Image (cartoon, rainbow, N blue to C red):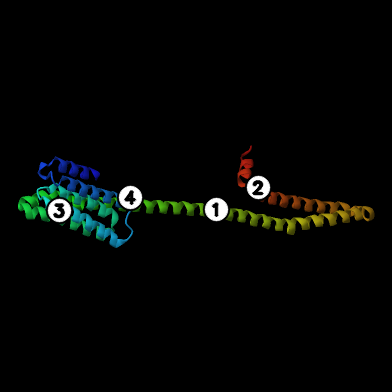
Amino acid sequence: MYCVYIAVVIRTVLRVEIRRLLPFYLVVELLSLVMFSLVLWRPIRWRGGKHLYFVFQSLLVLTLYLLFPKFDFILNLFLMLSFQAALVFPSRERWLWAAIFAMLTGLPLTVALGAFGLAVSLIPITLCFVFPAYVSVNLEIQTGLRTSQAFVDKLQTTNQQLTTYASRVEELSAIQERNRLARELHDSVSQIIFSIRLQSRAARLLLERDPEHVESQLDQLQALTKSCLKQMRSLIASLRPEEVDSAQRSKP
């Protein structure tokens, strides 16, 4: 957009009709450029101050045009103001100022040159709306990108939380399963071992008092031992990880 200012200044310097007013033109154009740059660099926060700024800038441009109406290129400065208004104001006020700048561009040329002036002003008038439209679309795209990025970040955070929660649930399930197996070990296997101990004592007593019944006692003791070993193997198999268990099953 600064190219528009440069073009206006160059055309002002090249016009010999205003040699006496050239310093005034250059000072006003420089003032307009400095204000334009300052507002871009440090935007005005006060809403009313923004409107006053554009009113003052419009008066500067109209002053330069009315001093010498043949300098119709001065009105191109409204294009820059229209672009800047699109950056400064929200959507409704943005289009309001675009319409004002379009009117300030077309009306003076139409009054001065008639139908020819209206025809000449059609392109600048169109650009007064094209620039805000471009800025609006660009801002909407940036807003959409920020919204999408925020949504993606939220999804990633949720996914991490779900992963952590799933690992905790799996860990709690493993702990609960081990506790259940420990209870079974205590309730069943320990009782069988206790019975084996009692049967062993009974076999020893029978060996001294009634040796003929020792064999049947030993058979019962062997059956209890076999049952205990079977349950122990079953519990140990339940405690193994699935990967290790499947690997052992696959061995020949």
Whether the residues at callouts 2 and 3 have beta carbons within 8 Å, the answer is no
Viewer-closest of 121 and 9: 9
Residue at label 1? 164
The amino acid marked with disc number 1 is Thr
User: Which one is in front in this view, the residue at disc 1 or the one at disc 3?
Assistant: 3
User: Which one is in front in this view, the residue at disc 3 or the one at disc 4?
Assistant: 4
Residue at label 2? 240
The amino acid marked with disc number 4 is Trp
The residue at 27%/49% (across/down) is 34
Report the Cα–Cα distance between label 1 and label 3.
63 Å
Farthest residue toward the right?
A: 209
Report the Cα–Cα distance between label 2 and label 3.
85 Å
Please indicate whether residue 194 sits to the left or right of residue 129 in the image. Answer: right
Residue at label 3? 105
The amino acid marked with disc number 2 is Arg
**Marking on residue 56:** none
